[in-house]
Image (cartoon, rainbow, N blue to C red):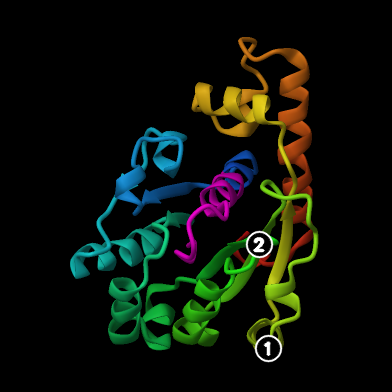
Amino acid sequence: MSMGSKGGTGKTTAMLLIADWLLLNGKRVQVIEADLENSGKAGGISHWFNDCLKLDIRSPRECDMVMEAAAENEYTIIDLPANSGAEIKQWWKEVITPEVLVELKVDVIAVGSITPYPGSTGGIFDWSAVLKDSCKYLIAKNMMHAKIQNFSDYYDSKAGQLFRKSFFPYEIKISTLLQEAMQQLVKTALRPSAAIEDKSIPLLLRQRIKNWYQSVFDQLEGLNIFRHFS
């Protein structure tokens, strides 16, 4: 699941790429849209998946349904809205115990997306204070909005150092995709790996899209964070 931190950090892009990679590897994936304000729009993950399940995490029962879906599917991808927290954090504290996760046979990976800009990491550190060691952490370093490569809030701040020392997060980097290529990708509403077969997209833009997602796929392939699910 994504950690619903600051908006504009690329968390939906990260979840889209992870879901696409899993599907390309033949995994059974249920995608859940919890960002209902962006549902169906390019900013929401349901833009890319027609069979997306939509749930309102302001409802405790629909929070339960998130975990029930995770128990029923090989993989479940849930994209939370930006700045979400109070409702689902309280639900997690009250309901999601280590014993519950064991009985459901669910392993949780919390995905946080950060940028080099100040302020993009705070929500992730707040989430980790609730989730603690009940999950693994995957940090997507989003280079799509800046040429700056120094993620100082993540690497240099006391909070960032404590987070990394405590939880040993996995990391991937999402590079910049040319704006025109992203516009074409959004227009098709196809997963990146499927969009490269769409001849309505100019060939060289398709190649840019392929290079972009393949870089992330190669990184995911090199991590062992998903291997115990195989």
Q: Position of residue 59 (x, y in %)?
A: 19, 65
With respect to residue 55, does 40 lie above or below? above
Q: Give the range drawn in magenta.
A: 1-19
Residue at image point 23% right, 62% down: 62
**In this view of the protein, which residue sits in the foreground, 141 or 193?**
141
Height in image: 194 above or below 83?
A: above
Mark 1 → mark 2, Cα distance in angstroms: 17 Å
Indicate which disc residue 117 carries: 2
Q: What element carries label 1?
A: helix
Looking at the image, tell me whether mark 1 or mark 2 is earlier in sequence order.
2
Relative to 187, say whether 60 is above or below. Answer: below
Residue type highlighted by circle 1:
Lys
Instruction: Name the image quarter holding the C terminus.
Output: bottom right
Q: Position of residue 91 (x, y in %)?
A: 29, 78
Decide: few, some or many residues near mark 2? Use Cα within 10 Å; few <14, some 14-19, many ≥20.
some
Vertical arrangement, residue 1 with respect to residue 25, above or below: below
> Which amino acid does the dot numbered 2 rest on?
Tyr
Quadrant position of residue 170: bottom right
- Tag 1 residue: 158
**Residue in the picture at 71% in, 40% down:** 213
Q: How crowded is the residue under tag 1: few (<14 C-alpha within 10 Å), some, or many (20+)?
A: few
**Image coords of residue 99 (percent x, y):** 39, 87
- Numbered disc 2: secondary structure: loop
